[in-house]
Image (cartoon, grey):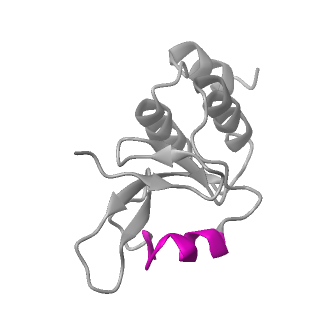
Amino acid sequence: MTRTLTLPNGEEVTEDDIILYDGYPYRLRFVDDDEYEFELSPLYWGNSGMDVPFSDREALVEQWEGDSRGTLTDEEWNGWLREARHNPKFSDDELDELARELGTNDGLLDRLRRMFGR
């Protein structure tokens, strides 16, 4: 049976789902730990020490903020990527990998347009 977590917005997610948490795409991971029940792992930076551990759902509820939304549609992820391309805190390599992970339509033509500033 697949384990699920109910997000503060009421949405139920599994470890296969990608969610927008704190303005960034994350994947849920249940952990086998006495202290933490689950963690949110950043899609690009996962397993790099940047995973966010939670002792329980209530701890997640306490940290859930306005730029956390849960799962997004492909169109919404494409919009997030377009906006992120204008944010200097994200590298092109990071965003290209996120686009691949998210399965968006951010293909060669889009990358060429960005390269030539159009």
The residue sitting at 38% across, 74% down in the picture is: 49
Q: Does residue 29 sit above or below 118 in this rendering?
A: below
Q: Is residue 56 magenta?
A: yes
Q: Quadrant of residue 28?
A: bottom left
The residue sitting at 74% across, 42% down in the picture is: 86
Q: Is residue 43 magenta?
A: no
Looking at the image, how many numbered discs can be counted on the residues?
0
| Image location (x, y in percent) of residue 50 | 44, 70
Q: Does residue 93 sit above or below 77 in this rendering?
A: below
| Image location (x, y in percent) of residue 36 | 36, 79
> Which of 103/16 is in front?
16
**Which residues fall within the magenta stretch?**
51-63
| Image location (x, y in percent) of residue 42 | 46, 57
**With 45 as the anchor, is 106 left or right in this view?**
right
> Where's the N terminus, which quadrant?
top left
Q: Does residue 43 sit above or below 103 in this rendering?
A: below
| Image location (x, y in percent) of residue 68 | 67, 55
